[in-house]
Amino acid sequence: MKKTAFGIIVVLALASASFAPVTAATDAPLLVPGYPAARDVAGAKELPDPHMDYKVVFADGQEAKSKSDINPMLPSIAQYLNTLGKYGVPANHRHIVIMFHQRNPDMDIVMTNEAYKARYGVDNPNIALLHALKLAGVDIRACGQGVLGRKIDLKDVNPEVTVDLWAMTTLVNLQLKGFVRVG
């Protein structure tokens, strides 16, 4: 009798479960306004999974064409976040870190607008997007060794950026905690 009741419960649970592919919620608000989510591709095999825990560290930035241009890595991260949101990945399943380090050609974007402008003569074009990413839950880090190497005074680091001891330590620690490095 117990086996039959258990079997009926399992059958009912499986019958009520949804095995349809995840579809995008087109009415979901963008996590990072002003940047698109990935466009839908009919029949795409891999889609963001709202049940998966996304642990991603972006670590190898690209260089902007000029000091007055936004770093090209940042809009890609905004698009990735918006895509996760579009497919219903909840905030508690989005663990996104950006790690700026000495090898990033544009590491100076971690500076406050005032410090960046004093150094380069133009406003830091990344400030607004870094702020939007932070509001969307992204953890923004800078390598302390890189900050020192680039002669950036700690008081000149954007307050939304956390300075770690060393990118090497941060990247190893995050990867040992299950983060995937992209870059």
Image (cartoon, helix red, strand yellow):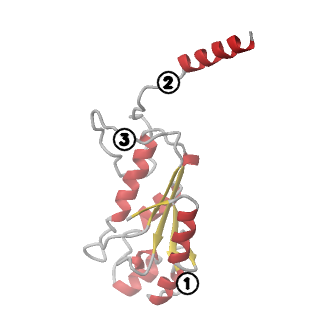
Q: Going from the N terminus, do you reach mark 2 or mark 3 first?
A: 2
Name of the residue lying farthest toward the right: 2
Given contact means CB atoms under 8 Å apart, are the residues at marks 3 and 1 in contact? Answer: no
Q: Is residue 36 left or right of residue 130?
A: left
Distance, label 2 to label 1, CA atoms, is 51 Å
Q: Earlier in the sequence, mark 2 or mark 1?
A: 2
Image quarter of residue 117: bottom left
Q: Is residue 43 above or below residue 78?
A: above
Residue drawn at x 50%, y 75% is 142
> To which residue does mark 3 refer?
46
The vertical placement of 39 against 71, above or below, is above
Q: Which residue is mark 2?
A: 18
What's under tag 3, amino acid-wise?
A: Glu
Residue 43 position within the rendered picture, expressed as x and y whole percent measured from the top left: 29, 33
Q: How many angstroms separate mark 3 from mark 1 (CA)? A: 42 Å
Mark 3 neighbour class, 10 Å CA radius: few under 14, some 14 to 19, many 20 or more: few
Query: What label does residue 130 carry, if any?
Result: none
Q: Determine the secondary structure under disc 2.
A: loop
- Tell me if residue 161 can be seen: no
Task: Name which quarter of the figure residue 87 lies in.
Answer: top left
Q: Report the amino acid beneath label 2.
A: Ser
Estimate the x, y position of residue 66 in percent, counting from the top left.
26, 76
On the question of residue 5 being in view, the answer is: yes
Q: Nearer the viewer, residue 114 or 99?
A: 99
Q: Nearer the viewer, mark 2 or mark 1?
A: 2
Residue under label 1, please give it: 154
Dot 1 alpha-carbon crowd within 10 angstroms: few under 14, some 14 to 19, many 20 or more: few
Instruction: Name the quadrant of the C terminus.
Output: bottom left
Q: Position of residue 148 (x, y in %)?
A: 50, 88
